Image: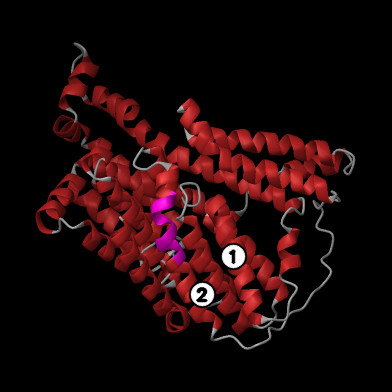
Amino acid sequence: MTLVIVVILLLAYILIATESVTNVNKAAVAIFAGTVGWVLYICYGSDFVMSQHPSEYLNFLDGMSANSIAVKKYIASNIFLKYVGRASEVVLFLLSTMTIVEILNNNGCFDFISQLLKTRSSKRMLWTLSVVTFLLSANLDNLTTTVMMLTIMHKIIPNRRQRMVYGSAIVLAANSGGILTVIGSPAGLVMWNIGAVTPTDYSLSLLLPCLIAWLLPTFWLAYSLPNHVETEWNVLPFRGNDTNLNVWQRLLMLFVGIGGLWFIPTFHNITKLSPFLGALCVVSILWIVNEIFNRKLFNADQMLQSRVSGILQYGVIQMILFVMGMMLALGVVKETGAFDVLANLLNTNIRNVWIIGLISGLISTFLDNFALAMNMFSIYDVQSQSNIYWKVIAYSTAIGGNVLTIGSMSGLALARMERMHVGWFFRNVGYKAAVGFILGLCAMYFIG
């Protein structure tokens, strides 16, 4: 049964990597692998429990008879819920940050980005988009930042080929900035939750490699642009949930939202509670401020409608379900003991963490970087690996995902929005990102 569960996970990886070919949504694949894996696991629960948790199970029985019902209760309460809790921490944090972005966006707090983009210089446009994306993705979820910046860029630049170049720069900046902090990507958040890294040390270690992986291909892209960029500025129609807040109100909301996210590591260090609780606290405060500022601008029906957050959109739900499904699927594989076998193989044949990182970066070019990162995190326990292992894997999987659009959720978002082919991306952007990835990994080696 262990082999069957592992094969299901491998087939899921194949379907996730070939999503653009099969058109099978990877969120559905991840959820299927996670749910079916746990069903198969509990069908053979006695064998798995006695091989992995014999002493804990005997303590749980406490004199009761060992039967199938007792095993299922033990698995449900002592094993399964542990992985549900870990996945829920990440999902709730993502949902909180996305809600913060939605509230800020609906109140025009990001309008300054459009003002910064009022230029005819193609290089200034490129660097403005890249710098803003990099900074935002370090504080918000990188996929949310990517979608927001692509939407802004799409409305301004009418030429599709130019949008493909600028959109590629946004993806490079989002993935590089997102992995720079523990709150910028789901992978970083998982490492923080399990205690593998601390926020400050993690960011300082990855600062130079991430800058190299971002700046080098972006400079390279700038040379392929003409001197001027075609832009069009249309007056956007009233969307129904826009507000007329003044500048100081928007700045206050931006401070509450972004500043609150900055405070979450301190909140975690003081309380030792899960970071998602701090994120939910920021959401609640920002929500209250939002309703106070807007109470006179809406009638009762409009106010009620504005409370239904636009974050509950189809694409966002897909990402959340994908994260939940992958963490549950990897959890059940870990409970079978298969990752222990893989860890022994790696320790016997490949002991060098840098070689493992290079291989991970290569695989992440065609396999979703979050799925691969979670797989590599599941192989070892926190105590069995040095601090550098987690940083190398986080960097390699995230930046390796820049080489092809299918390697990251941000790249897939760009490919779908601009109907971009994988071949075009690699010829014009991917190989540049690969050079940046290798040089960034070399920088990490010498400073680490």
Q: Is residue 237 left or right of residue 352?
A: right
Rendered view: 315 above or below 68: below
Rendered view: 114 above or below 312: below
Rendered view: 420 above or below 29: below
* Range of residues picked out in magenta: 203-211
Q: Is residue 24 left or right of residue 350?
A: right
Residue beneath disc 2: 218
For residue 353, which quarter of the picture? Answer: bottom left
* Mark 2 neighbour class, 10 Å CA radius: few under 14, some 14 to 19, many 20 or more: many
Residue drawn at the location 47% of the way across and 83% of the way down: 428
What type is the residue that disc 2 sits on? Thr
Seen from the viewer's position, the closer of residues 84 and 8 is 84
User: Quick check: is 51 in the magenta stretch?
Assistant: no
Q: Calculate the distance from the C-alpha at mark 1 to the C-alpha at mark 2.
A: 10 Å
User: Quick check: is 210 in the magenta stretch?
Assistant: yes
Residue drawn at the location 20% of the way across and 37% of the way down: 44
For residue 1, which quarter of the picture? Answer: top left
User: Is residue 416 visible in the rendered structure shown here?
Assistant: yes
Q: Where does residue 104 sit, x and y in percent of width and height?
A: 71, 49
Residue drawn at the location 15% of the way across and 30% of the way down: 50
Quadrant occupied by the C terminus: bottom left
- Magenta span: predominant SS is helix
Q: Mark number for residue 68?
A: none
Q: Is residue 384 left or right of residue 401?
A: left
For residue 55, which quarter of the picture? Answer: top left
Residue farthest to the top, as pictured = 63
Earlier sequence position, callout 1 versus callout 2:
1
What type is the residue that disc 1 sits on? Val
Q: Where does residue 430 sit, x and y in percent of width and height?
A: 42, 77
Kindly check if marks 1 and 2 are in contact, taking CB atoms under 8 A apart as contact. Answer: no
Residue beneath disc 1: 131
